Image: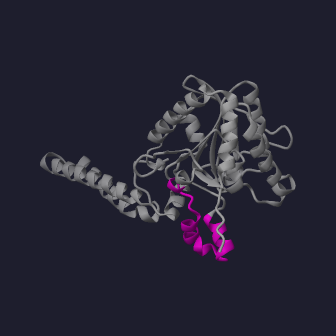
Amino acid sequence: MANDEPTPGLPFEQPIYELEARIHRLRKDADAADGERAAELQEEIRQLRRELTGTIERCYASLTPWQTVQVARHKDRPHTTDYLTLVFDEFVELHGDRNFGDDRAILSGFARIDQYKVMVIGHEKGRTYKERNACYFGCAHPEGYRKAMAKMRMAAKYGLPVICMIDTPGAYPGIGAEERGQAWVIAENMHEMSQLTTPIICIVIGEGGSGGALGIGVGDRVGILQHSYYSVISPEGCAGILWKSGEFAENAADALRFTSKDLFEFGIVDDVIEEPAGGAHRDPHQMAIRLKQYLTRTLREVTESPLESLLDQRYEKFRRMGQFLEVEN
């Protein structure tokens, strides 16, 4: 999480961190000063704070696609575990796929949000190296997706809406995962989610990478945080295929059209949830408030709709994606 003392940030954020460093130094000086000098320093701090607000707004008003990727991967960006604490109440985690093991890259469990009892499922990347290693940096194995589907079936059995929080660079690409049916289980999840007899809300909270995201990404409403991305492949992977080098990741990001604005225009996502100034990592609590407001409003809409109508709309929504035109030369 972001803290009070300035720390080195992303390359394009350097003007922001320089101003924060100046404010931090002046605040120390003001605490040590007294009388007229203290008043002068406080006035200078107020002016710099106004300048800081403007600088943050300018930096984030026109992010490039590659800068959006950097923000989505920011080390302080809130994860699923953070939102479980800030948005939901009474979370009870459920473990295991009842087949192979418990994949820590996907969390699942019962929770409450306002008056709604729900099933929450989400990718988890971890914070410390130990946590990230245990979570495979958010890259789930087949058992993670099987765990997710088992809990979704349980939710449907008890009439609970499902909320999926997506934050992964992609499904785990190792040999063991492939041997245990990685591609098959993702396809199976997509098929079963399209027919699951309970409302489903999916939110991309950070990275939405390829099949790893789609494995828990089929829903009645698909939302995305403003500075997240949702893509068929990572920029580095795309650059490796098209340009034969990861050095062209920025070019790939421009070509992939995966920012929240593009995705909304293409009809891939239903809603873009605005982030606080400077991104979710600068004010996780405010981001949590906005996410909770979106979820409660959307839960009210989907739970009041007839289930048969929801299922028809869910199916048609995803069938419409990927339409294209053929032009004869």
Closer-to-camera residue (33/141):
141
The reply to whether the magenta stretch includes residue 217 is no
Q: Position of residue 124 (x, y in %)?
A: 65, 46
Look at 48% across and 49% down and name the residue there. Answer: 281
Please name the colour scheme applied to the rendered image: one colour
Closer-to-camera residue (29/227):
227
The secondary structure that most of the magenta stretch takes on is helix
Picture layout, residue 165 above or below residue 328:
above
The quarter of the picture where residue 14 lies is: bottom left
Numbered range of the magenta stretch: 235-262
Look at 58% across and 45% down and name the residue there. Answer: 79
Q: Give the residue at the far left of this rendering.
A: 36
Picture layout, residue 172 above or below residue 164:
below
Which image quadrant: the C terminus?
Answer: bottom right
The reply to whether the magenta stretch includes residue 261 is yes
Across the whole image, how many numbered discs are drawn on residues? Answer: 0
Can residue 158 be seen at all in this image of the molecule?
Answer: yes
Q: Give the residue at the far top of this rendering.
A: 115
Q: Is residue 109 left or right of residue 18?
A: right
Q: Position of residue 65 (x, y in %)?
A: 51, 62
Picture layout, residue 311 above or below residue 19:
above
Q: Give the residue at the far front of this rendering.
A: 328
Look at 31% across and 55% down and name the residue there. Answer: 54
Q: Position of residue 129 (x, y in %)?
A: 64, 54
Q: Position of residue 163 (x, y in %)?
A: 63, 36
Can residue 131 be seen at all in this image of the molecule?
Answer: no
